[in-house]
Image (cartoon, rainbow, N blue to C red):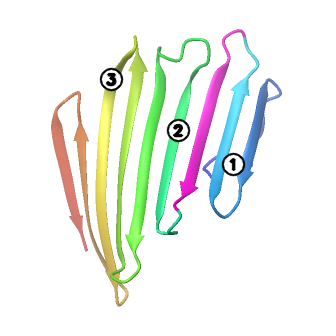
Amino acid sequence: MFPGAGRFIDPLQLGAEICNSSVKAEAFVTAEKNPVLDFKAAVRGMCDCKTFAMKFNGDLLAPTKKSKLGFSMAGYFHESALQYGCNWNTTVAASALTKSAYNFYFHHSRGGSTVGVHSSYDQDSQKWASALGL
């Protein structure tokens, strides 16, 4: 389930949730003058080792103004216990992508131990950050 799934539903929201072995999705729309869509979906790949996800939160009547958008991909290799993934989040403001952030990670587990590296890039500040963990 997504964080917030099973949450209290506002009476001014319309929505739906789907959850099975290959798709997890939820979409809620507010019934206000300017309806806001909150959409999240994840799909497990055909080989069962990759997952693709996207999210959108923004005004349905003006989706290019102050909307939040994100895409993710995660996977693993069965034979090596290597996990990997990447994530991109951005804000759409005045038809331009702003506040873009990119994350990349690799983790390896064996014998009860895990080693991993995580790198992030913030496009607005043009700065990289990395962390290595054992």
Closer-to-camera residue (47/37): 47
Residue 31, position in %: x, y? 76, 19
Q: Which residue is mark 2?
A: 55
**Residue sitting at the far bottom:** 111
Q: Is residue 122 visible?
A: yes
Q: Is residue 1 visible?
A: no
First of labels 2, 3 by sequence position? 2
Badge 1, how many Cα within 10 Å: few under 14, some, many 20+? few
| Spatial CA span between label 1 and label 2 | 14 Å
Tell me, for residue 120, which label it has, or none: none
| Spatial CA span between label 2 and label 3 | 16 Å
Q: Which residue is mark 3?
A: 98
First of labels 1, 2 by sequence position? 1
| Spatial CA span between label 1 and label 3 | 28 Å
Q: Which residues are magenta?
A: 33-45
Tell me, for residue 5, which label it has, or none: 1
**Discs 1/2, front:** 2
Q: Amino acid at mark 1?
A: Ala
Give SS at disc 3. Answer: strand
Q: What secondary structure is the magenta-colored segment mainly?
A: strand
First of labels 1, 3 by sequence position? 1
What quarter of the picture does the C terminus occupy? bottom left
